[in-house]
Each structure stands twice: as C-alpha cells, then as structure tokens.
Image: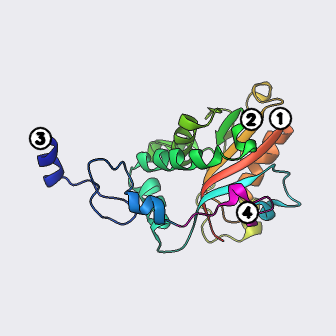
Amino acid sequence: MFNELLHLFFPRLCPSCNSSLFQNERVICFRCKHQLPRTGYHLQPGNPLERVFWGRVPFRSAAACFIFRKEGGVQKLLHELKYRNAPDIGREIGRIYARELMETPCFQEADLIIPVPLHPEKLRIRGYNQSGVFGEGLQEILPARLSEDTLIRDINTGTQTRRSRFARWENVESIFTVPDPERIRDKRILLIDDVITTGATLESCAVKLITAGVKEISVACIAAPL
C-alpha cells in the first residue's frame, strides 16, 4: 500500500517516452526496450560503425546498441543520462546490451571493459561517468571486469558537439594517458563510450592502449548514427 501511494504522488516515468512505469518495469518501459531502434551491428562483420575506423585503428569489432536519431527516444535517454543525474539509465542499457553482446565471441572474450574517461573536473560536476555506468551494466552480464582507472583523461577539452572530424581529432589527440601499461599488456579490451560520431575520441584512446601493449580492442557504445 505504501509503494502504491508513493507511486501515486511520485510516479516513476520512462525517460524515453515519459509514460508511467509498471511495478515490474525497471528504469525503461518494456515497450521502449523493444521498440527503440537497434543497430544489430554486433552480428554484422564490416558494419558501418567498423568502417568508420578502417585505416585508422585496427579494432577487432565495433558495435552500438541503438541507432541515434535527433529528437528520438534514444536522444532523450542520453540527455537524461548525461544531464539529469540518472546513472541508472546507463546501467540498465548496459545490462540490455550485454545480453546481446554475449551472442558474439569477441565480446565474450574481453578481459577488461574500459570506459572513455571524463576529466576529474567534469566528473566532479556530473558525479559519475556516463560511459562508466554503462560499463557497470555490461559487467553484470559479460565475463570482463570493468576498469575505470586504466585510462586517464589529463586535459579537459570541453564538448565535441559541432566540431568537424579533424577538429575533434585535434581536440583529443594527446589528452589521454595509461598510468600503468603493465596492467593491460596482452589483454583483450572492450573500449566503451556513450555516443560515437566521428570516432575521434575512441581513436585517441585506442592509440594509447595499443602503445601500452594491449592484445586487441573491440568497441561498444550506447548509440551511433547510421
């Protein structure tokens, strides 16, 4: 009775469609979980996201859970995750996507999940790394262990929005470091982020990880445009 009264005065809403969540729904409603546009990239060798990195970084595989469209439900989820203090959204998407990634060997075989790091100042302001909480959800299902201190962002570059591909690369070319390369030498890495557009940030991260001696890198993100 108490829970019903609490739900009456403080309804739990789906961050994607804004409908009330039923008692057995967690974070995102069942309808959105099934209707939000999926990429299916984890099952498509040579998919469009992998082709973004061809000739740039030798990723084993690259995949995204959702197709990003402006003004769509996925954009609403990401906005809530990044700017409305809603880390549970990232964790829930991580759990959803991890079950799909378990269908593909390269994601099953990863040793470490490494999120693209935030600068400490931005982390202090936001309170969490949106890619890190996505990784927490992935870690619940995948065999790999989440490691949030393996890759460090030394310089706060600000937002990448509205930058060209070349400008984005210049903006992130030398901002990441690997403090202890021995921790990741010969490891299989799953590098994760929230949204991939030009891929400049992930490319910069991957260069540092490759230089540190990792065995291979795959990429997974919450969303990517077609």
Image spot of residue 63 (x, y percent):
68, 56
Toward the viewer: 161 or 100? 100
Instruction: Looking at the image, tell me whether mark 4 or mark 1 is earlier in sequence order.
Output: 4
Q: Would residue 84 be found to the left or right of residue 181 on screen?
A: left
Q: Say whether residue 123 is magenta.
A: no
Tag 1 near tag 2, CB within 8 Å: yes
Q: Mark 3 highlights which residue?
A: 2
> Element under label 4?
helix
Say which mark, if any, is on residue 212: 1
Q: Which amino acid does label 2 sit on?
A: Val
Q: Say whether residue 46 is magenta.
A: yes
Q: Which amino acid does label 4 sit on?
A: Leu
Disc 1/disc 3 C-alpha distance (Å): 54 Å
Say which mark, if any, is on residue 178: 2
| Crowding near the residue tagged with mark 2, few <14, some 14–19, many ≥20 C-alpha atoms within 10 Å | some
Display colour scheme: rainbow
Disc 3/disc 4 C-alpha distance (Å): 47 Å
Instruction: Looking at the image, tell me whether mark 1 or mark 2 is earlier in sequence order.
Output: 2
Q: Which of marks 3 and 2 is in front?
A: 3
| Region in magenta | 37-48
- Indicate whether 45 appears above or below 153: below
Toward the viewer: 163 or 76? 76
